[in-house]
Amino acid sequence: MVGALLPILGGIGSTIAKNLFPDPADELKRKELEQRFQQQVLAQSGEIERAAADIIKTEASSEHWITATWRPILMLVIIAIIANNYLFGPYLEAIFNIAIVLPLDDRLWDLLTIGVGGYVVGRSGEKIVERWRGGQG
């Protein structure tokens, strides 16, 4: 998650360093500040990842059905759009000459990728913890 933000955060650090040390003679100071900024971002990335995992875990264990299921519902809706556009739509077009194609924004693809990746990593982590504790897994 944070890894995807590193180029953006690196750009922010670079901009800050350039504004603090605009003189080309201060190139060494500027590079050192950029490097320290990136080191701090990396040092905090583990904590950010843990906080995100805690949020998802808390949502999934919520008593309220909408809080516990909104992420899976979102994933299913995106998958339904993909199935429509690439599976059902072409067959309907071939058979009946009618197809309804729903636009799928790139950001929805990103959400699907993050959602599936988070689920796989989360389940793997759960199984590792269960085995470590002596459970079946």
Image: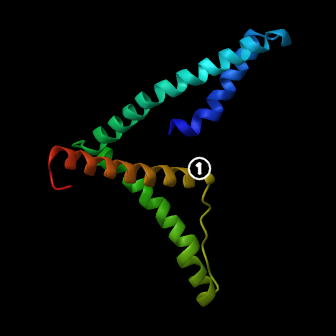
Q: Name the foreground residue: 126 vs 36.
A: 36
Q: How is the image coloured?
A: rainbow
Density class for disc 1 (Cα within 10 Å; few <14, some 14-19, many ≥20) is: few
Q: Residue at x 66, y 21 (%)?
A: 13
Residue 107, horizontal then vertical, whole percent: 59, 49
Name the secondary structure under disc 1.
Answer: helix
Residue 111, horizontal then vertical, whole percent: 51, 50
Q: Quadrant of the C terminus?
A: bottom left
Q: Residue at x 38, y 49 (%)?
A: 121
Decide: is 42 above or below 76: above
Q: In the picture, residue 9 is in which quadrant? A: top right
**Seen in the image, is 77 located left or right of residue 38?**
left
**Seen in the image, is 39 located left or right of residue 26?**
left
Decide: is 106 above or below 91: above
**Which residue carries the number 1 mark?**
107
Q: Name the foreground residue: 64 vs 17.
A: 17
Q: In the picture, residue 53 is in which quadrant? A: top left
**Seen in the image, is 133 located left or right of residue 94?**
left
Q: In the picture, residue 50 is in which quadrant? A: top left
The amino acid type found where label 1 is placed reads: Arg
Decide: is 69 above or below 28: below
Residue 2, horizontal then vertical, whole percent: 52, 35
